[in-house]
Amino acid sequence: MDINLFTSDRWGNLKMSLNPHKTLWLSWYPHRRTSGICQAWEVPLEIIESSRRSPISWLSKSCKTIKTLHRKRPDVLFVQNPSLGLTILAVLLRSYFRYLLVVDAHNEGVRPFVRSGLFVQFLTRWLLRAADTNVVTNDSLANEVSAMGGRVLILPDPLPTPNFTQQIDVSPRKKKVDVAVICTYAADEPILDILAAAKLMPEKIFACTGRVEKFESLGLQAPENVEFTGFLTDQKYWDLLASASVICDLTLMPDCLVCGAYEALSVGRPMVLSSNKATEELFGSVAILTESEPSSIANALQNAFKNEAEISRAAIKEAHVYQNTWQSNAQKCLQEIEAQKQRHER
């Protein structure tokens, strides 16, 4: 089967904007969600990075952030949380620069998981209340933000545009990988359970993305049918996803909508995802959900292999429905931010 769906204008024109307001989105690290929303909303994005180690890195990026705000003087400032440091800085500087502050709060910015100490939880609640509005990906997170006294809008990720050759043969005879496992070896990823599931399926080839040195630092042993891709360029990453039989992206975070789900939908591949309410609501019609337990993961993968063609057809159809719905929701969010800006100026 040849795939020729993946063109940059596949979804039509999604452009929206807050013009004539001066807008700016600041981030301390790249993220596909951020770049996608900025592109759709025509918001300039500046990624502020530093090669230094923390806490010097925080100081360096803070200085660069302040200089950028002096230079750009936005009317509306968007930031993503994480980064916690950037969001704190944006709140503290708001009264001086007089911008409307919109915080795109990822799961970690609502329910701290990786860094979950009491002080971080206190800061998280304060930031959610302090922002002029927060944007989250699903109802469960929105309910928590509201319960903490924060103002909130809901917008899942836009579907990313794959970056690879438009004609890709994904027929079984051309496939070299059965399961593409999307991972960064972060604390919320059940890597040990995924490796154990792979051991239960020795006839299948698993390819784990992410930096090999991070996996090696965990001190884990992988079965012989697991390969490690190391860091991939964007094009090679998309080639891997499109040519795999199944895409697997698991997390231990409650109600977390993983990037791999949007990516799998974008290339029309079967996906195995963690079972949680938010994932079931958004991707349940085209995803196979699993608990983070080896036999459960293996069973879900086998189910995906068995129904690969049917699920792929459903995913391609769902991708178009999803993007139309996303465009409508994105426009509503932008209209609400515009209304808040007008109230902010009174």
Image (cartoon, rainbow, N blue to C red):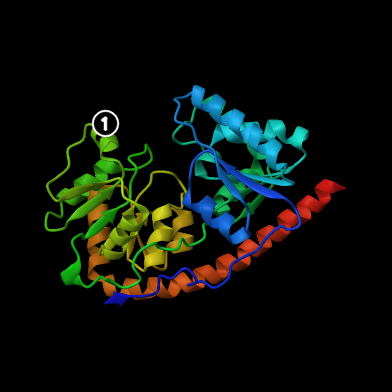
> What residue is shown at x 64% (from left), y 37% (from top)?
68
> What residue is shown at x 40% (from left), y 65% (from top)?
265
Q: From the viewer's perspective, is 69 left or right of 249?
A: right
Looking at the image, residue 310 lies above or below residue 335: below
Residue 322 in percent (x, y) is at 50, 68
Q: How many marks?
A: 1
Asked if one can make out residue 250 in the rendered structure from this viewpoint, the answer is yes
> What residue is shown at x 39% (from left), y 70% (from top)?
315
Looking at the image, residue 46 lies above or below residue 21: above
Q: Residues within 10 Å of mark 1 (few under 14, many from 20)?
A: few
Asked if one can make out residue 131 in the rendered structure from this viewpoint, the answer is no
Q: Residue furthest front?
A: 71
Q: From the viewer's perspective, is 102 left or right of 216?
A: right
> What residue is shown at x 59% (from left), y 29% (from top)?
62
Q: Callout 1: helix, strand or loop?
A: helix
Looking at the image, residue 321 lies above or below residue 27: below
In the image, 87 versus 108, the foreground residue is: 87
Residue 309 in percent (x, y) is at 28, 74
Residue 178 in percent (x, y) is at 21, 60
Q: Residue furthest top?
A: 56
Q: From the viewer's perspective, is 294 left or right of 38?
A: left
The quadrant of the rendering that contains the N terminus is bottom left
In the image, 197 versus 262, the foreground residue is: 262
Q: Amino acid at mark 1?
A: Ser
In the image, 30 versus 103, the foreground residue is: 30
Residue 132 in percent (x, y) is at 72, 44
Q: Which residue is mark 1?
A: 217
